[in-house]
Amino acid sequence: MRVGWIEDRTGARQWFRSVRARLSRPLPLKSAGITLGSVALFLLFLQFVSGALLTVYYVPSWSDAHDSVAHIVTEVRFGWLVRSVHVWSAHMTVAIVALHLMRVFVRGAYARPREATWWCGVLLGSLVAGAAFTGQALPMDEEATGGMAVAASFADSVGAGALVRGGPYVGQATLSRMFAAHVVFIPGSLLLLITLHLALVGRHRLQGAETMEGSSSAFPRRAALSCSGALAVLAVLAVAWPAGLGSEADPLGTAEHVKPMWIFLPIYQAVKGIPAWAAPLLLAIPAGFLILVPFLPWRRPVLAAGAVLLAAAVALGVLGAMA
Ligand code: HEM
């Protein structure tokens, strides 16, 4: 009776049925990494939940942010675990999204008719990186202020320094902007783009599935198994290596020795020693390649160019880590 009442008003049951029917359409399950996108989705969900809990105690103030994070870790019950899950799931999301991108690239699944799915994915990848970057700025340790200073000088080279800094110097206004981007603008854009991405995946189906017939319940089961595996890895990482908190930033000091998160190490290394104006141009090479890829019909040269870019990123990342 009650279900009927809800169904009359929302159509929820019908909606769930249509989602189940879509998920039980046969998929090319032998294709390795087919559940990577689902794992990314699951990890992002964990980040939304743990991040929402952290905002209850976090104070986005230049003078109190570090203390508020220290309070979460030492005094709030299970605060250390929630923060650790948030930080480790961020690392895992970045890694899984990168693997998902590489899988789609290697299989050529960016080609017609999935160009829009790919471009939407490129935007999603940038937003995930943006979430990691802005999140790192929030604890106001040395890594945070060092990152904000680098972001501001990078933004200066494309004329957007004031937008990032919020004033003449890196300070409270910069932190407020990082906070707003991290908890409102980036998650909101992620939700919109994920909805679009999944709608496009539903429309064009996965590469190789177009020609398959019948039904199978194997994909939801496979995806659930992959997500459980990711959850187990996350639990081990979060409990065995709780996320650390660096020493409080000295507002007048320069934090030259600090390094960014691993995903940004290639950029950090590549822009060393080149004029500031050249840095955005350097970054435009991989970005332009990813945007143009669906227009490039030559399979082997495109794969080779992708391999060269990946090798350069890994080499620069290793150099950046050792420097
Ligand atoms: C927040 C990040 C992302 C999420 C949550 C996500 C989610 C998903 C999911 C659930 C699927 C269907 C299953 C699968 O293929 O794994 C998918 C497919 C796809 N994704 Fe993503 N994705 C993300 C980022 C990206 C990125 C960075 C790219 C590439 C630039 C991309 C391009 C694609 C393409 C082209 C497909 C269709 C693949 C095929 O037909 O085989 N996605 N995505």
Image: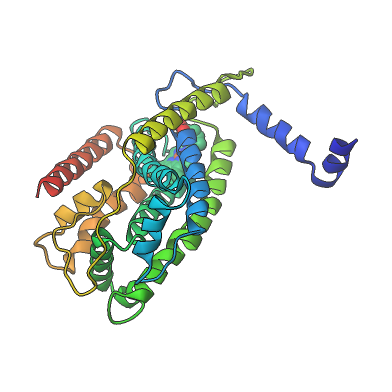
**Residue 40: percent from left, percent from top:** 45, 38
Horizontal placement of 2 versus 219: left or right? right
- Number of numbered labels in the structure image: 0
Q: Nearer the viewer, residue 13 or 54?
A: 54
Q: Nearer the viewer, residue 254 or 13?
A: 254
Give the residue at the far right of this rendering: 1
Give the residue at the far front of this rendering: 75
Q: Is residue 104 visible?
A: no
Q: Nearer the viewer, residue 291 or 12?
A: 12
The N terminus: image quadrant: top right
Give the residue at the far bottom of this rendering: 168
**Which quadrant would residue 322 be assigned to in this image?**
top left
Q: Image height check: is 107 above or below 40?
A: above
Q: Image height check: is 122 above or below 210?
A: below
**Residue 85: percent from left, percent from top:** 42, 42
**Residue 31: percent from left, percent from top:** 42, 22
Q: Is residue 55 visible?
A: yes
**Which quadrant would residue 19 be assigned to in this image?**
top right
Horizontal placement of 198 versus 164: left or right? right
Say how the picture is coloured.
Answer: rainbow
Which residue is found at the position 58% from the left and 21% from the top? 26
Which residue is found at the position 46% from the left and 45% from the top? 78
Which residue is found at the position 36% from the left and 63% from the top? 67
**Residue 318: percent from left, percent from top:** 14, 42
Q: Nearer the viewer, residue 247 or 128?
A: 247
